[in-house]
Image: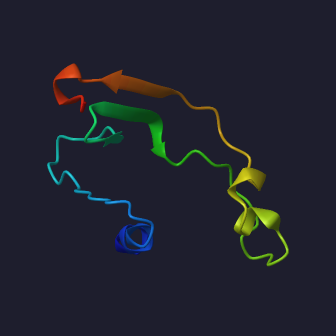
Amino acid sequence: MEQLKNSLDSSGIIFEYEFDQSMAFHARSIETDTGWKISVDRGLDIFQPYDFKNSFNLANTIQEERLSKGFEVTYLRDESKKKA
């Protein structure tokens, strides 16, 4: 995650994250500071396996070339956190 954060810094994107370490928490979601919560039912494991050892496989470098598993995404909006 630090690599992602550092790579976004040069684009002017402020990326902050935290992991919930409680044992009772299982769901995975992304919450934005603009009030959006994005929940993916598979966590972030949405892609089917691919041959990552084959350096000529386009899926190694182009995400659009990877097949995905079936999944659902839920978008929720907390109006109290909405920025003007």
Q: Position of residue 48 (x, y in %)?
A: 68, 49
Image quadrant in which the N terminus is located = bottom left
Q: Position of residue 41 (x, y in %)?
A: 45, 33
Q: Is residue 50 left or right of residue 26?
A: right
Q: How has the structure been colored for display?
A: rainbow
Give the residue at x 22% y 56%. Answer: 18
Which residue reaches farthest front? Answer: 84
Q: Relative to 2, is 69 above or below?
A: above
Across the whole image, how many numbered discs are drawn on residues? 0
Q: Is residue 9 left or right of residue 62?
A: left
User: For residue 14, what is the image quadrant?
Assistant: bottom left
Q: Position of residue 29 (x, y in %)?
A: 35, 40
Q: Relative to 51, is 22 above or below?
A: above
Q: Is residue 68 left or right of residue 18?
A: right
> Foreground: 12 or 27?
12
User: For residue 63, what is the image quadrant?
Assistant: bottom right
Give the residue at x 32% y 32%. Answer: 36
Q: Relative to 14, is 31 above or below?
A: above
Q: Relative to 36, is 64 above or below?
A: below
> Foreground: 4 or 41?
4
